Amino acid sequence: MATIKTMNNISKKGLGLFGPFYQVSDSIENPDAILVRSAQVDTDNFDGLLAVARAGAGVNNITIDKASAKGICVFNTPGANANAVAELVMTVLGMAVRNADKAAAWVKGLDVNDPDLAKTVESGKKKFAGMELAGKTLGVVGLGKIGVLVANYARWKNMRVIAYEPYPNANNMHELSNKVEIADLDTVIANSDFLTVHVPFIKGVTENLLNRKNLAQFKGSYIMNFARGGIVEMDPVNEMLASGSLQGYLCDFPTAELIKNDKVTCFPHLGASTEEAEENCAVMAVEELKDYIEYGCVRNSVNFPALVDHPHAGIKSRVVVINQDVPNMISEITKVFGAEGINIASFSNKSNGKIGYNLVDVESKVDDSIVEKLSKLDKVIKVRVIHF
Ligand SMILES: NC(=O)c1ccc[n+]([C@@H]2O[C@H](COP(=O)([O-])OP(=O)(O)OC[C@H]3O[C@@H](n4cnc5c(N)ncnc54)[C@H](O)[C@@H]3O)[C@@H](O)[C@H]2O)c1
Ligand SMILES: O=C(O)[C@H](O)COP(=O)(O)O
């Protein structure tokens, strides 16, 4: 029986994939794994934790470094909620440039008993005249799963799109419209009518990626942040809004100050909250956790190297060894098996510069004492045996 602690509401479609071998509850104290959305997870608070799956993209709510130090694998679900965010970004931008929310609110406030209602409506509409997206330039910062979709949707609306991406991923680039122009960050900022940011929040790295210095070059009308609050420095944005050089700030991360500002439209961290995205994320996260717990396979981890290698039919034990990524570990690990007279049927290893990950398959039931012997090796972080 494996235990899974849920720390947010997770779609039933995903939870339903855990079979009878799993106990799933939000009240388990020391679970084998955690399934979470945006709740804070300090992995040091859980003894014996094997893994954390983030049903979503951003993992800044999880203590990744602490997890790595203890051999805890952290997963996310790349792309599973990207369309939800991209559609919201384009919807919100479309509403902003047409003053659609303000205009609709004005109509709702009209006196329905006004005998000249139709006239009032017609004469009032000029207050809400807007502009079109077609022909304008959208700057996209970050061409990951969401940034690529936003860029493509903007192209379909006949916008010019310029984008910045320092670490282009081949799969993402293949999805990108070939009409999207790639440029450095300053060029993107300086040439955009609207700017949208889609990078992860990484303290000291993407923190204030849009800041006083580079935003000084922005001549456009709207900045959108549906990524994370800390990515955009707020003091210059507030000053630009106050001076009128910026028409609006559209974001998914409200603060007291933002809510009070009439030129800011805030949403309640709504980007991924569609039935489809919640299901996609939960299904992917549960599949990742099950494959890890049952077979030690790693896909979509943010701190472990990918290694998907299911055991063949004759395998009775799989020993999972997690070590710091230093030279000579494979030889040290295999020596322990040799000294115990255990024949290794298959050995898979992957490393990512920080973590070395090994799956050692044996055609007999190994004694759990191998765990103790392997754990004593210098630089080994965690060992477990999966019996079949
Ligand atoms: N509002 C919401 O509900 C919501 C939903 C999903 C994701 N998000 C946020 O959006 C972010 C992006 O999501 P995604 O699915 O596109 O992730 P992703 O990993 O597919 O894309 C992120 C992109 O940012 C790039 N990047 C990394 N460091 C960078 C840097 N220093 N400068 C510029 N680009 C950098 C990466 O190379 C990658 O291409 C998430 O990390 C999360 O914080 C918010
Ligand atoms: O990073 C993400 O995936 C989003 O911020 C979504 O967060 P949520 O799952 O709490 O809605």
Image (spheres, grey):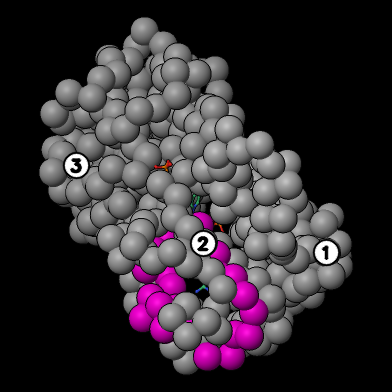
Q: Amino acid at mark 1?
A: Ala
Q: Measure the alpha-carbon separation of dots 3 and 1.
A: 66 Å
Tell me the kind of residue under disc 2.
Leu
Mark 2 vs ligand 1: CB below 8 Å: no
- Taking depth in this image into account, of 49 and 132 the one nearest to the observer is 132
Q: For this rendering, which residue is in front, 106 or 111?
A: 111
* Marks 3 and 1, the one that precedes in the sequence: 1
Secondary structure at badge 1 equals loop
**Can residue 364 be seen at all in this image of the molecule?**
no
Q: Amino acid at mark 3?
A: Lys
- Pointer 1 or 2: first along the chain: 1
Provide the residue span drawn in magenta: 216-240
Give the residue at mark 1: 134
How many discs mark residues in the rendered view?
A: 3
Tell me whether circle 2 and circle 3 mark residues in contact (CB < 8 Å): no
Q: Is residue 31 above or below residue 263?
A: above
**Percent coordinates x, y for residue 2 in the rendering:** 28, 20
